Image: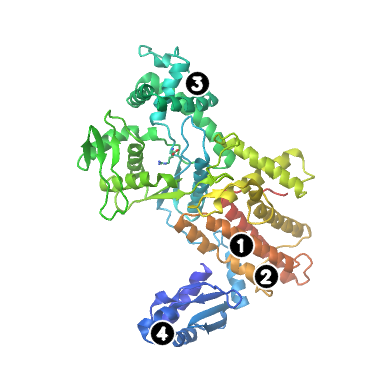
Amino acid sequence: MSLLSSLTDRFADAYQASGLERALGAVTVSDRPDLAQFQNNGALAAARGAGRPPRDIAADVIAAAGDPEVFSDLSVAGPGFINISLTDSYLGRHVDRLAADSRFGAVAHDPDRRVLIDFGGPNVAKAMHVGHLRSSLIGDSLQRVFRFAGYTVLSDIHFGDWGTQMGQLIIEAQLRKPDLPYFDPGFTGPYPEEPPFTLEDLQEMYPAVAARTKADPAEAERAREATLELQQGRPGYRALWQHFWNVSHDSQQRDFAQLGVGFDLWHGESTVHDRVAPMLERMQDVATEDAGALIIDVAEEADTKEVPPLLLTKSDGGYLYGTTDLATIDNRVAMKVDEALYVVDARQSLHFEQVFRAAYKAGIASQSMILEHVPFGTMNGPDGKPFKTREGGVLRLDDLIGLVRDAALARLDEAELATEYDEEERRDIAEKVGLAALKYGDLSNNRASNYVFDLDRFTAFEGKTGPYLLYGAVRIKSILRKAADADLVPGSIIAPTVDPERRLMLELSRFPEVIERTIESRAPNHLAEFAYDVVTAFNRFYEECHILSERDAERQASWLGLVELTLAMVSTLLDLLGIEIPERM
Ligand code: ARG
């Protein structure tokens, strides 16, 4: 159980014993670590209702809570705060219990609760851009932490494989290779197995046709018709589309694997195509016709800004991005999902507002189902605009990974790290350091803010960076290796005697709250921040406590136990951020 919740329980009992509300007992980490470890502010809140001075109430609560085994200090401060510090023996026992728990005291959530995380969201034939990268990093960290917390998690990439772009690609394909059988309505098959275009082709074709259809309404019209025919099942178009899909899927799956990000489901917009018509049928009562199109009004009285109706079908009968998202919710209900989190760029907020409202209004989702947009800001370049390559193009994910790997290699040289290892290991270390730099650089920011991608800062071994944490973790590993070589074995953790040791123990005890906060706010920056705090507290402890030369065997074993616990927790935290630790550096 978490230290804060057991202290809170004790204080709740003490308030109750003084005839006051249990809820007043909330204990928090002290704002003034120089004066106390924890604090409780309940007496101040109780004073108004009780008609008594807060300091008097605090004195009563202290008298009721006091336990010399647990508290080394309970005192009233200022207008009526209660300052709280623990005895070293209580703290030591608590941390020793943490070390025996693979969850470090974190709450086990209900495994029957099914949480779907929709993230990644790349599109067929389009290069992934930084928005997809952020979605992938944040979404992956969230799937890891929700899983760690005990929920049943389903991650779904929601592949963009069904919109107007598909029709655009088809007409572009026809322009480039008109003799392919896919365009011949009389062709009776079978269609070739070899894909007619590579991913490079597709990525070049897509912007070309996008520009053409934008400039020329007749071309746009052809693309629209091709999309409709594809969606209505024209065999040649379906076969060609399947090639586009496979080629894009294979390459993107490789990219995601390099990034260390995996999905349970590769569902796409096309997956739910067959659900759309019956769903629209069921929506008859809430949908209305508008100039041949079908729409659903989702405005609410309390709206302060205009929320326009969601367009369900265009006048030609074609479906839209929102229509597929609605059908996807229908599918997720069928998959018994309780909670669906959409980790998507903040610029799509209005879209999700419309879709979620429509889903509730039409009864596709029950009111008890949670549909939530988890928005994030953009990763910007040094110019403050969304990150682009030097040439102004979209940066491909594998190029980005190459970029951070090279920068990491340069940093390793500069810091004279990993110099004696063979090329292969050095490359592997650089890849891990590079990815840690990239992921930590992203995840340590508040999810909603924009941030600047600063390769120099992200790859530094000093400061709040991925490489700093990896270096810290690797150093902890090497301490344990050295101890093992000297036949020293970690033992049970006993009462701390020096301040950096106490600080480290208090820091480690915060783990359960950090996990809860991350889950509640759907924001991995809390994990990132905490991992940094733990490594920093460890470094201070290690400076002060000379473990390997300690004469008192019990103390030495306890310190090694603390080292082992720190490593286990840091490894868990980095894993929850999707960061891998090399064996050595
Ligand atoms: N493919 C979309 C894009 O590139 C992102 C998909 C997000 N998920 C969703 N259910 N709409 O913008």
First-in-chain label (1 vs 3): 3
Q: Secondary structure at mark 2?
A: helix
Please name the amino acid that badge 3 sits on: Pro
Q: Which residue is mark 1?
A: 533
CB atoms of marks 4 and 3 within 8 Å: no
Label 2, label 4: how far apart the Cα atoms are:
36 Å
First-in-chain label (3 vs 2): 3
Mark in front: 4 vs 1: 1
Q: Quadrant of residue 232?
A: top left
Mark in front: 4 vs 3: 3
First-in-chain label (1 vs 2): 2
The image position of residue 457, as x and y in percent, is 65, 50
First-in-chain label (2 vs 4): 4
Label 1, label 2: how far apart the Cα atoms are:
13 Å
Q: What crowding class fits label 3: few (fewer than 14 Cα within 10 Å), some (14-19), or many (20 or more)?
A: some
Q: Which mark is residue 500?
A: 2
CB atoms of marks 3 and 2 within 8 Å: no
